[in-house]
Image: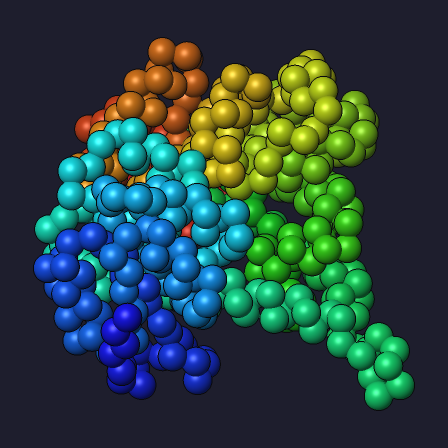
Amino acid sequence: MQSVSRAPEAALEGSTHKARVLVVDDETDVRQVMMRMLSSAGYSVCTANDGEEALRVLEKEPIDLVITDIAMPKADGMTVLRKVRERNEELPVLLVAGAPTTESAIRAVRYRATEYLTKPLDPDTFVEAVRRALQMNRLAELRRTALELGHGRNAAGEPSEERSLRERFERSLAALYMVYQPIVSWSRQCAFGYEALVRSSEPSLPHPGAMFEAAERLNATSELGRQIRAKCGDPLQGADPDFTLFVNLHSRDLLDEVLFDPSAPLTRWAARTVLELTERAAIDGIDDIADRIARLRMLGFRIAVDDIGAGYSGLNSFATVQPDFVKLDITLVRGLDKDPVRRRLVRLLTELCNDLGIFVVAEGVETPAERDALIELGVDLLQGYLFARPAAPFATPKF
């Protein structure tokens, strides 16, 4: 096992910890090439000759990022990815394929690979993918640390009031507000709809991920969901906008009977509202899920499956939910114009949805090249910074 020292600039931002990368490939030449690129970028590197050795390394050593070939003897890269996910939901894993296939791309999505790269590796693209993956890992670590502050104790061993997670969560609810990002129809050159996105001016839980993690730890997802649904329709009061409103729904919201109340605030706008179920949260454990979805449709809501491409259960929710919309995750959209594997996967998903009468929305569109690639693949509904950032209602998108 080799280790390469790295320069200070390759440290995880905001930490003295030196990022350690595990490279897994059964070809010596390929391992050496990746090690040279990572060493030149200043990273610390260790290697494994196959998946079995990689799993042993992961048992013994702290690793910040795994880069693994897919096709290997003994345990292949997909096995490494699956085993990592069984133990750690957030450790970034980059998959590298010499002969990429649609099947391997779909499996990469299912087991939540951080990125899917193809050989031969372009040095700049490779190092940039490593940098992004380590940043994501650092952000996840910061979120965990922030939430752990809620369990701080004072000198007497009692929970510290100022660090109480419940109090910070209550403050974030009181400071909660909504912003809206347009979803455009490229063919019609207009705003098809707006997605309502939650924000809070409470500094201790400043972004949606922190709020939802706190809600989950406090068993308060229903409380947060009710507040969001009560507020997201406010700008529609006294107006008659000609667009569809998209509202995110946590899977646990489906267990909240208030969601199905005909007098609930959002139900007034049900006919023009799409409820988005995220693929990042499992719905498998919810009893009578089909009946609950049917009850929402009886109220007039339509249903979307969000985050396709980064999901917990891949495409499993299609049969259960039978969505009216699917939203392609940013991980499929980012760099789509340069990645034939992503393009093929998006084309297959779009063709499947067209056959089923499902609308496809692509999230995270940031460049004209990504936009043009999506349009070529048959995706007409687009969302991202290229058109407008989330804002108070309702920003006019740029075309």
Residue at image point 27% right, 65% down: 47
300 left or right of 71 in image: right
> Could one spot residue 388 in this view of the protein?
no
Q: Quadrant of residue 384?
A: top left
177 left or right of 68 in image: right
Residue at image point 69% right, 73% down: 149
Q: Position of residue 319 (x, y in %)?
A: 52, 17
| Closer-to-camera residue (290/32) | 32
Q: Is residue 199 above or below residue 339?
A: below
Residue at image point 84% right, 75% down: 159
Q: Is residue 323 above or below residue 367?
A: above
Q: Quadrant of the N terminus?
A: bottom left
Q: Position of residue 391 (x, y in %)?
A: 50, 52
Q: Quadrant of residue 49?
A: bottom left
Q: Position of residue 314 (x, y in %)?
A: 45, 32
Residue at image point 72% right, 55% down: 217
286 left or right of 79 in image: right
Judged from this view, the residue extending furthest toward the bottom is 155
Q: Position of residue 65 (x, y in %)?
A: 37, 62
> Could one spot residue 216 in this view of the protein?
yes
| Closer-to-camera residue (312/339) | 312
Figure disc tally = 0
Q: Quadrant of the C terminus?
A: top left
Q: Is residue 77 above or below residue 290?
A: below
Q: How is the image coloured?
A: rainbow
| Closer-to-camera residue (365/134) | 134
| Closer-to-camera residue (269/160) | 160
225 left or right of 197 in image: right
